Image: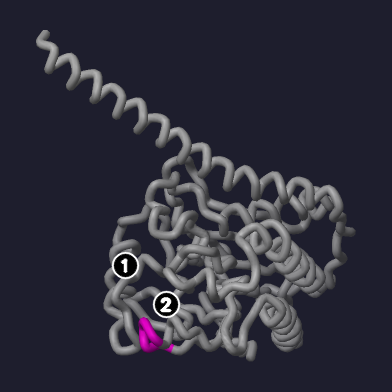
Amino acid sequence: MSIESELKNEGLADQNRRLMREMDRVRRGRADLVAAVYSAFADNVKAITYTPSKPVIDRRKDAQEETAVIVFSDLQLGQVTSTYNSDVAEDRVHRYGDKIEKLVTLQRSDHPIRAGKLYLLGDLIEGELIFPSQPHQIDSSLYAQVALNGPRILTDFIRRMLGIFERLDIVSVPGNHGDVGGGSRKAYNPETNFDRILSTFVRQLLEASGEKRATFRIPDGFGRSSFYAVDYVGDLGFMLWHGHQARRTSSSSHLPFYKLVLGWRGGAIPEPFRVSICGHHHTPTTLTVNSVRHFINGTFASDSDYAVERMASSSMAAQWLLFARSDKGLTAEYLVSLE
């Protein structure tokens, strides 16, 4: 081998070693970020205890029993606008709980409602690096969103629901604001998502408190985004997803929703469903896609400058509350205003 070749190979070896060291540093940084949040929560949970809540018991024997379907998405905890911040977010979650209780009481005047479904459809937090100017439009760190304020707000809401229903099934899917690392988030394991981590924290809090009437389903899997779940009220399937998968949508064009829902319903996913629900777009509406009802949820936030400037869209602080029976499908639909 010539001296020139040896020098070239030695240079490549040095470059390779530098790249390997850099990759190791980045890997450690990513692991440290997630580990730090988990460690903070572990320390926090030791100081928090809850007494299991007591439900309202409905002893009527009635074949017309229905299930409440509580849609909860786009809390954007930590976001700051002219009319929204973390305190307003918490107030609106409380307001949502108040209105759910009143509407369930109204429905119960006619028939039993013992069970509730709580569908957490992502963007529970705002994140820090999702879009360029975001660090200037938040009032709390990712740590505070995921390990402090988020667990408190969600746990309080779930315990409120457990005071209304005899049992509560919770399903959580991830949103894009839960992705880690902003523009470089594609380098992370697709499973790593702070919506998923927050939901796991809340599940651990309730389990540690001895809460037996809440079940959790949080789709995950190493190397997978696990972006959706299908949940059932009897035989009635609900396709649950965040909504950022539908791109290039607008108030005048819902074609991306039709394409996705029809494709999934046609066999792209194996589970059958008759109702589809997503968040992300912040403007609540409902579509009929052949035999499927599709619901687009609102948000808890309001007056986002980013949405107005970049998408010419105004958000609506509202959430869907549905009621369903396996044999009848959807029986009632309420768009619950939170402003």
Q: Which residue is mark 2?
A: 293
Q: Position of residue 61 (x, y in %)?
A: 77, 72
Q: Position of residue 117 (x, y in %)?
A: 63, 67
- Residue furthest to the top in view is 1
According to the picture, the residue beneath numbered tag 1 turns out to be 260
Q: Nearer the viewer, residue 210 or 129?
A: 129
Left or right: 313 in relation to 50: left
Asked if the stretch drawn in magenta spans residue 312, the answer is yes
Query: Which residue occupies 43% across, 78% down?
Result: 281
Q: Main secondary structure of the magenta part?
A: helix
Is 105 placed left or right of 169 in the picture?
right
- Residues 118 and 206: in front is 206
Label 1 vs 2, first from the N-terminus: 1
Q: Given the current orientation, which residue lies at the most extreme left position?
A: 2
In the shown orientation, is residue 183 left or right of residue 1? right
Is the C terminus in the top left, top right, bottom left or bottom right quadrant? bottom right
Q: Tell me the number on the disc at residue 46.
A: none
Query: What residue is drawn where x is 43% and y is 51%?
Result: 225
Q: Residue furthest right?
A: 51
Q: Could you tell me if the residues under marks 1 and 2 are in contact, i.e. CB atoms within 8 Å?
A: no
Locate residue 198: give its quadrant. bottom right
The stretch of residues the image draws in magenta is: 309-313
**Residue shown at 52% from the left, 54% from the top:** 193
- Residue 225 visible, this angle: yes
